[in-house]
Image (cartoon, rainbow, N blue to C red):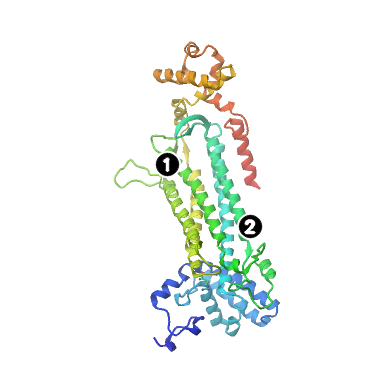
């Protein structure tokens, strides 16, 4: 193709031939970064206002830029903006449209700015809004967890270690463990937001700009808490993307554990819970099946999000300062992470509301598992037996109960006395599931009283 026939990219002045179709497609980001369109306009409006206030452009130019950008904003919102791959990315698409609309003034918008600080700013604006949405959705999910826990403050279930029945707990207590995980996730998102909320714009390509810009003015307008203080770092840093994706991975990891439990608990072998039909699917061949697809997919998508974290870390590991085109690869993992967690949080909050609990099965499982064996040992210790000896005595008592196919609390007092002479009839208040639960009455323990308190505390926090 002769140079005169080239469809001109705005950077093509020094080039003698156009890129091939494949290179054009390979280097373009418009298919995914158009998502940043509205944030790009927000950043450009703040930049243009500052340029005019600093007399770098005229008020007349500013007015034209403002009205042009506002009409582009409308086009984007209406879905009528035509994104073109010939214009490579979101920034060049919008700038070209602006110039087509308002002429000369449009060409002045890029004064004192580079796509390098522009894209870093757009991404931070997008991520800030995404974090805010994520935090709200975590709170909604926490509310679902707390409401379910509230209903099951007194529902007894076996607590597990090594997936073996360990000690009785309440279902409310077990659920509140997830509330705590989500609370840590929430504060991690808040922390990430603080570190991220610094303005890169003004760093230009990498070294800053020779125009008398006012970065603080732009920061204030765009609600950043401060400025990125080194221009080279500002255009090359993607820590905020990595941090967000890490926090998202940990959130997914927590929900993956929860999902694993829901999947097991809803299998007939456990029969602890039932997830409503609208969150499950059937099998095309086995008519009896009801598959917990939603928790399974949440568990599956945890791999996907953690994969994105690895992508971003690898993306950055060997980049010399400052900006490199590699950074364009940050967007798809980041966007997909956001889409995934926002969907997961929404669907999970709904799904938890749909869960019905089989209290009878939960209780029976705890009884079958000799979950109060530790309580018997603790009882013997109170009566003066050394813990190691008590452990031995209880092991024998459990054996006897297994042989008789009954619970420890169903052994007659005479039988129990055979294992240790310190045992008397007050032992039964220790051997029941309820007795065991009630005795763990300290902050963090599973007693009914403590679980109630922790639920009240969580409810209060969620109302703030
Ligand atoms: N589309 C680019 C990206 O996402 C924008 C920055 C381009 N800068 C450059 N010097 N080519 O990273």
| 259 left or right, relative to 192 | left
Task: Tell me: residue 147, above or below residue 372.
Answer: below
Q: Quick check: can you spot residue 73?
A: yes
Query: In the image, is 224 to the left or to the right of 13?
Result: right
Could you say which disc has been placed on residue 263 in the image?
1
Asked which secondary structure carries label 2, the reply is: helix
| Distance (Cα) linking label 2 and label 1 | 36 Å
N-terminal label among 2 and 1: 2
Picture coordinates of residue 216, whole percent (x, y): 69, 68
Q: Nearer the viewer, mark 2 or mark 1?
A: 2
- Is residue 225 toward the left or the right of residue 239 in the image? right
Using a 10 Å C-alpha cutoff, classify the residue at mark 2 as few (fewer than 14 neighbours), some (14 to 19) or many (20 or more).
some
Q: Which mark is residue 213?
A: none
* Residue indicated by mark 2: 194
Total labels: the figure holds 2
- Determine if residue 275 is in view: no
Q: Residues within 10 Å of mark 1 (few under 14, many from 20)?
A: many
* Image height of 284 relative to 92, above or below: above
Quadrant for the N terminus in the image: bottom left
Give the left or right position of residue 357, taking residue 153 as reference: left
Q: Which residue occupies 57% across, 37% down?
A: 150
Between residue 352 and residue 2, name the one nearer to us.
2
Query: What residue appears at the point 43 percent right and 47 percent down from the top-left corner?
Result: 279
The residue under the point 48% across, 51% down is 344
Instruction: Find residue 160 and report its horizontal and vertical position in percent.
Output: 48, 33
Q: Is mark 2 within 8 Å of ligand 1?
A: no
């Amino acid at each position: 193709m002769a140079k005169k026939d080239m469809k001109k990219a705005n950077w093509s002045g020094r080039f003698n031939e156009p890129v091939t179709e494949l290179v054009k497609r390979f280097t373009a980001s418009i298919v995914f970064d158009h998502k940043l369109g509205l944030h790009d306009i927000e950043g450009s409006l703040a930049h243009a206002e500052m340029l005019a206030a600093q007399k770098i452009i005229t008020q007349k130019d500013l007015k034209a830029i403002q009205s042009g950008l506002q009409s582009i904003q409308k086009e984007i919102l209406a879905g009528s903006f035509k994104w073109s791959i010939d214009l490579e990315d979101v920034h060049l698409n919008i700038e070209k449209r602006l110039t087509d609309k308002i002429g000369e003034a449009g060409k002045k918008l890029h004064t004192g700015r580079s796509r390098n600080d522009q894209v870093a700013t757009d991404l931070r604006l997008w991520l800030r809004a995404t974090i805010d949405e994520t935090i709200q959705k975590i709170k909604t999910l926490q509310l679902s967890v707390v409401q379910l826990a509230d209903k099951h403050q007194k529902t007894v279930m076996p607590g597990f270690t090594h997936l073996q029945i360990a000690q009785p707990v309440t279902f409310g207590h077990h659920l509140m463990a997830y509330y705590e995980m989500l609370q840590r996730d929430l504060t991690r998102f808040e922390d990430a937001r603080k570190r991220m909320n610094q303005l890169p714009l003004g760093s230009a390509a990498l070294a800053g700009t020779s125009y008398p810009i006012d970065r603080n003015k732009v920061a204030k307008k765009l609600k950043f808490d401060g400025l990125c203080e080194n221009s080279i770092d500002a255009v090359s840093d993607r820590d905020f993307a990595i941090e967000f994706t890490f926090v998202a991975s940990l959130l997914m990891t927590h929900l993956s554990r929860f999902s694993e439990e829901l999947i097991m608990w809803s299998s007939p072998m456990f029969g602890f819970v039932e997830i409503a039909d609208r969150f499950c699917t059937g099998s095309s061949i086995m008519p009896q099946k009801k598959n917990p697809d939603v928790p399974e997919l949440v568990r599956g998508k945890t791999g996907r999000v953690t994969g994105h974290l690895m992508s971003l870390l690898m993306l950055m590991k060997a980049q010399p300062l400052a900006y490199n085109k590699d950074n364009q690869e940050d967007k798809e993992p980041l966007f997909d992470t956001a889409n995934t967690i926002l969907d997961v949080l929404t669907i999970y909050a709904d799904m938890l509301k749909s869960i019905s609990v089989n209290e009878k099965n939960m209780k029976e499982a705890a009884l079958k598992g000799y979950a109060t064996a530790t309580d018997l040992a603790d009882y013997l210790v109170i009566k003066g037996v050394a813990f190691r000896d008590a452990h031995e005595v209880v092991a024998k008592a459990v054996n006897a109960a297994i042989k008789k196919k009954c619970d420890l609390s169903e052994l007659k007092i005479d039988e129990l006395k055979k294992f240790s002479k310190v045992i008397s009839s007050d032992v039964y208040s220790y051997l029941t599931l309820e007795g065991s639960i009630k005795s763990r009455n300290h902050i963090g323990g599973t007693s009914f009283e403590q679980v109630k308190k922790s639920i009240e505390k969580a409810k209060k926090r969620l109302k703030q």
